[in-house]
Amino acid sequence: MQFVLRNVIRGVDRVNWLCGWLLALLLLVMTVLISWQVFARYVMGDSLTFSEEVARFSMVWMTMLGAGYAYRQGSLISVELLSDIGGARFANLLRLCVAALSCVFAWVLLTQGWNITGRVVSQTAPSTRVSMAWLYGAMPAGAALIMLNALAILLDAFIKKED
């Protein structure tokens, strides 16, 4: 059983590795587009029509995917007062409760995000003329990554408990 659980966790870590590279790529795209926009506006005297919109879409995707990625890394902001006061055992229990509640929250975000994404498929973005579903799709994608990482945190705790 532990072998299967460890392979699942390795699979989640591979997804996070790919997500990390995707986040870096999105940051690169955003940086290049914003720099290009500044250059075009102030040097060439004519601003681009699509760069702000694509940069904004990239930022939304970075935020949603970055939240799931940072959750697995333990990089999200947290209030550690209760875990410091309660001791190690209470801190572990609290971490598991937070992971379980994160799964529930991510499930709600996933289902509602999927619903909203389905509603905006026919709408298009003003500059790029792509479907707004590409923008709204960041919400269910980020929620799926949060849920996957919360489950990995729970599986990590289960494996450590068995060891």
Image (tube, rainbow, N blue to C red):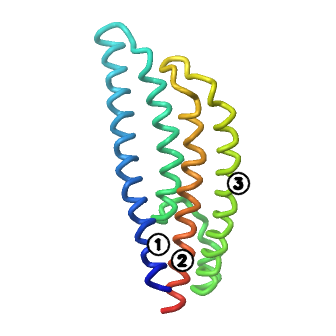
**Residue beneath disc 3:** 108
Q: Nearer the viewer, mark 3 or mark 1?
A: 1
**Residue beneath disc 2:** 155
Question: Is 131 placed left or right of 24 in the picture?
Answer: right
Considering the numbered disc 1 on the image, is that residue within a helix, a strand or a loop? helix
| Residue 44 in the image, given as x and y percentages of width and height | 29, 9
In which quadrant of the rendered view does residue 123 lie? top right
38 is higher (above) or lower (below) than 66: above
The foreground one among 46 and 102 is 102
**Residue beneath disc 1:** 8
Residue at image point 66% right, 70% down:
100
Residue at image point 64% right, 81% down:
93
Amino acid identity at mark 1: Val
| Residue 37 in the image, given as x and y percentages of width and height | 37, 20
Q: Residue furthest top?
A: 45
Considering the numbered disc 2 on the image, is that residue within a helix, a strand or a loop? helix
Amino acid identity at mark 2: Leu
Q: Residue furthest bottom?
A: 163
C-beta proximity under 8 Å, tags 2 and 1: yes
The foreground one among 121 and 162 is 121
